[in-house]
Amino acid sequence: MSSSDETIVHQNKTFTSINYAEKQLKNREFVNCEFVSCDFSKSDLSYNDFVDCHFKQCNLSLTVVTGAGFRDVSFTGCKVLGIDFSKCNKFMFSFHFENSQLDYSTFYGTKLRKTKFIACSLKETDFEEADLTAGVFQNCDLSGATFNRTILEKTDFRTSRNFNFDPALNKVKQAKFSAYNLAGLLYHFKLDITDEIVD
């Protein structure tokens, strides 16, 4: 292995306001690092590893993450638009998302057990065939999000809105819903649902 191919490890570092838009990052491993107000939009992070890292107010729109490892990685106040997480390293795959935009991203076929999405926008996000067992969608907007052959057992939707999926096409045992958002489960029946009491 030439020296140019050796992995460079960054530990316990904070990266602030770095502009890495449309650039390619190679042979890097980040452990317990923090990224603050960095721009990774349209960058290529393929085959790099991030362990116990925290992204804050970063832009990762359309970032390429093929083979990238993310283990215990948090995103807070980030734009994470249009990312295909299904191409990440499946053996390093655990996240926490808070106050972030994940619109048009895909988690197709991924394992997201116990993953928390807190106050996130998940419009048109693809969760088809994903395992979201015991996951939490707290105060999230799921407009147009796709759930098909998805494992949603013990998943908490109680404070989220605008989701709709067919319970018959997903595993929903012990999933949690509010009486106020059940309409999303009945959408495919084309029912006329109202909260008004008619005399």
Image (cartoon, rainbow, N blue to C red):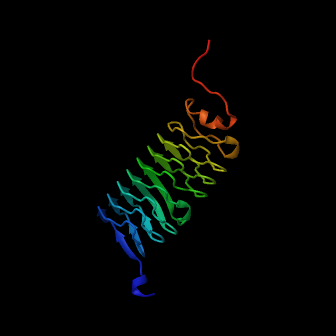
**Which residue is drawn at the image coordinates 62% and 40% (left, top)?**
174
Q: Farthest bottom residue?
A: 2
Determine whether, in the image, residue 80 is placed left or right of residue 154.
left
Does residue 105 lie above or below 173 as drawn? Answer: below
Give the residue drawn at x 54%, y 49%: 124
The structure residue drawn at horizontal position 40% and vertical position 73%, both measured from the top left corner, is 28
Q: Position of residue 141 (x, y in %)?
A: 49, 42
192 sits to left or right of 143: right
Image location (x, y in percent) of residue 77: 37, 50
Q: Name the one closer to the observer, 124 or 119.
A: 124
Q: Is residue 48 left or right of residue 176?
A: left
Compared to residue 158, the image places residue 31 above or below, namely below
Q: Which residue does the image show at 32% across and 57% down from the upper left?
A: 37
Front residue of 50/12: it is 50
Q: As displayed, is residue 162 above or below residue 191? A: below
Q: As drawn, is 160 to the left or to the right of 174? A: left
Give the image location of residue 74, x and y in percent.
42, 55
Residue 118 lies, in percent from the top left, at 45, 45
Question: How many marks can you see?
Answer: 0
The C terminus - image quarter: top right
Quadrant of the drawing holding the N terminus:
bottom left
